[in-house]
Amino acid sequence: MQANKPENFTQNVTDALAQPDLKMIIRRTTDKAEAKRSDAIANFPEFEKARAQGQKVKDHTIKHMEHYLAEFEKNALAQGTIVHWASTAEEASKIVLDICREHKAKKVTRSKSMLGEEIGLTHAFDNSEMERIETDLAEHIIQLAGDPPSHIIWPAMHRSREDVVKLFREFHSDPTYSEEITDLVRSARRDLRTKFLTSDIGISGSNFLLADSGSSCTVTNEGNAELTITPPKVHIVTAGIEKLVPSMAHAIPLLRLLTRSATGADITQYITFHNGPKRKNDADGPEECHIVLVDNGRTKMLAEGMEEMLRCIRCGACMNHCVVYKHIGGHAYGSVYPGPMGSVLTPHLQSLEVANKQTHACTMNGRCEDVCPVNIPLPKLLRSLRAQSWEKKYEPLTNRFVVKFFGVLAKRPQLFQLFSSCSLIFMKAFSRNGWIKYMPFTSGWTRNRDLIEPETTTFMHQYKKMKKSESGGS
Amino acid sequence: MSDKNNYTDANQSNTIECLNISEKRVGLFVTCLVNTIRPSVGFASITLLEQAGCTVEVPAAQSCCGQPAFNSGDDEGTRQIAYQVIEQFEEFDYVILPSGSCASMIKNNFIEVFKEQPGWQARAQHLADRTHELLSFLVDVCNFKPNGVELDGTFTYHDSCSGYRSLNVYEQPREMLSTVKGLEHKPLNGHSECCGFGGTFCVKYSDISNAIVSEKVENVVAADADYLLGGDMGCLMNIAGKLNREGNQKITALHTAEVLAGLAPKIIGANDAS
Amino acid sequence: MNKQISDMSREKIFSAIQAAKPTITADAKTIEDEALELLKESEFARPQLMSADATEALMLRIDAGLVIGTTCEKISTLDMLPHSVKQFFNKNALPSELKVQSVEPLNKLNWQGITTDIDIVNDNTVGLCWAEYGVAETGSFVAHSGPEMPILLNFLPLYLIAVIPKSKILHYMDDYALIANEMAKKKQTPRNMCLISGVSGTTDIEGVLVKGAHGPEVLHIIIVEDE
Ligand code: SF4
């Protein structure tokens, strides 16, 4: 499946809505996620307070970003980690590939990280002489299928069991002929086991970076991160600079929020803090450890009043609860990050010019903000991006005209009332049996639904008449 | 209600004020949809506010709350509208709107566009502090209990997004409707899920909106009630318009205020006639 | 070449942060105090434990089925461990083969009748790990990498037994994190600190939970009252 482009959003949406089983495919994941999250929160009555603490930790770190980045760097170096900095996605993936080439790597195992996708690592490897092996089961599936991810937590949610059966039979060295999900997972286990153990380089992302120790933290249910990182000689971490927190004790409240919001679990099975290369007599572990700290638009967000977005812990709750995502799915957004968080992030990672349509594809119902574990005001941020689009005139001319026209009326109440009365006459002319099925200038509405026939005159008209007759009568 | 995060309402202390509410002047902002499409909601609002003991005035020079401009990112356009709304309404003790989304626009968003104009921002804040959505105002501030209203049948309730999430409108309409004789509540699956209206969204992304409202309609039909009630004309028009397009004429959409003011029989009668 | 890019980017990133409004420069002490303020007891919201006693809470949590693929038992002395391990073999119909972490307390035990130095790369083997800590909140055990602790021991076998001394069972994850913060201060952080709460699982195919995705499918926790 070819990756969609963000600038083709309107077309992507049309394509998505035309897929007959898309809704079923999305719901089997998001419905479960919604239900499990709400159970998890019901079992944790102090969730609100936890959320406040999580937000404070993130805000504190963002406010002192400079200090904590410097601390992190110092402590990571002291652990023996080699620290790299990248301003852009291209720089970041070039640094990673060059490290691999220096080590003459042939096989590279990777543990899922959205940042890796963001900086284009997957493509960079596919265009290189090296073999990339995705070890997260979902990433493994979409790698075999050649798909982009459709969700940040369940990137292969769009693939059915039947799809997986086909893919595994085609690509696995010792495939199963069963169609049972358990057997499919075993097939992947067998296939990946040798790859883990013979990989030259292990690449991971990081859910948290601890400034006081220079640690990076991975959070998984499969345990694939540790299996990716431990056997190879070299470990490379790629992480966005917003992943920082002061210490492990500061990360714990965020972990409590992350797992509950993402999958509804109290905790994931594996949380590991990685602190540089193997110590002198260690039984196992990589001999060399690199970390690439990536900006790619994050400092721009800081500069442009979008710092609240840097709190994001990538839990995916906002998309699981988004009515728009639930109908169009992740691929329509044309970005690594779909849903509400993606609509805010993509304009900064790519550009507002290519990704402004997504910011309008939102009803402003506020559900995403309600469920966000770190209280990110997503609707407010989306709206401020719309304001930027308006300023920069990215909006189609017709939309601008309609809004302007309405605005001109709205600020002149007399004219507004006159226009309202006139439009009633117009609407009346198109009504049949209490409903309007079609009317010029309202096709956006009547294309999919009927318009209720209005009363004969406006409220204001009737009200004035009533007042007049009241005072006449007294 | 599991994902609500602000249970505390900024206007909790209003119980004290409700003792002498009759001395307070209430300005009614009918909103543009009520003005053009459904005037009866405006009259129902006046009736209810008066029953609750308020002195109601309807400033003649009113238009729109500015949401289309605001949600399109047109800050300057929003300001132009806001100047005018503030000037019209700031003198009232209370400003009441029969719509959660328009009330929330004035309460939460006007201050956003005046970030660089502290004077206007203060006036916007002053207006925001006294602005309320009708149904929550009647219960939370006026302690109002409808009396002697009758309507036979069953209803299901759609909680519109701004009312539910930004203004904590949930219990109040249900509480008032429970006093209506002959009327029985039927739960709506996904009662607080967006209906896909979203103002300009429903015309800009008509097809996404359609997918969303189709699902809402499925749930409304499954609730198997005679009436679909809500507190926002936008959502009601959207859901009712989709119901009608799908050929479902069994369910009548009404604004809660219309029912509480006893206007429902008249509206239903008129519908039947047409 | 890349060093140059990296240095330039570092400078760019730091100056962009300095220029941005929401960030402020403060001295390290002020920042540290502010950070400590966030860890004040009153700030914390923690889930309720199933018992005030940490060991009991941990066991209750596992018994309630809240820790995926995990069972537990308590033994009074360490020398009972080989017996418990044998029972585990029987229960799971496994050959008596065990990869024991080479750590003092375990080395001293009498493993008679059990092959103890096996290759863990292949499945159907059992690993035995001596945990540093236990955490009641999440039903976890904590492993630290070191000369005697190959991290892969916790990930390669399909069956895993973790032994936790009762005295090392903490109430909350935060209790462990504060210990980790102290280690960081003393620059004594091990390479890996793994908080393991259940077995390797995935829901990536149609949302169905499958245990034993890459690592263990079965985890048995044995708590030793008196080491
Ligand atoms: S924006 Fe909030 S809800 Fe969405 S992924 Fe980020 S943290 Fe989670």
Image (tube, coloured by chain):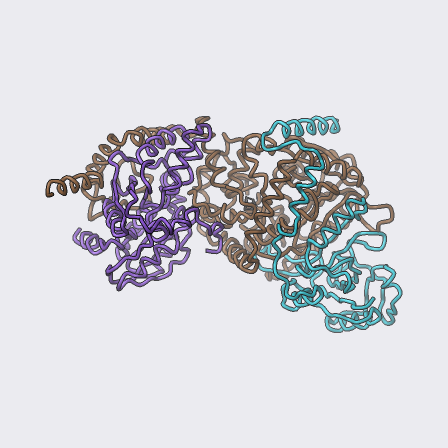
Chain colours: A brown, B purple, C cyan
- Which is more toward the observer, A176 or C51? C51
Q: Is residue B13 left or right of residue A371?
A: left
Ligand 1's quadrant is: top right
Q: Can I make out residue A227 in this image?
A: yes
The answer to whether A370 is drawn above or below residue C222 in the figure is above
Q: Is residue A459 left or right of residue C182?
A: left
Q: Residue furthest left?
A: A473
- Which is more toward the observer, B35 or C217? B35
For residue C54, what is the image quadrant?
Answer: bottom right
Q: Position of residue C38 (x, y in %)?
A: 64, 46
Q: Position of residue A292 (x, y in %)?
A: 70, 36
Identify the residue shown where x is 53% and y is 34%: A347
Q: Can I make out residue A107 in this image?
A: no
For residue A213, what is the image quadrant?
Answer: top right
Give the total of numbered labels: 0
- Which is more toward the observer, A270 or B100? B100
Identify the residue shown where x is 73% and y is 73%: C91
Q: Is residue C148 left or right of residue B261?
A: right
- Quarter of the image for the N terminus of chain B: give it: bottom left
Identify the residue shown where x is 21% and y is 56%: B265
Q: Position of residue A388 (x, y in %)?
A: 47, 30
The answer to whether A18 is drawn above or below residue C127 in the figure is above
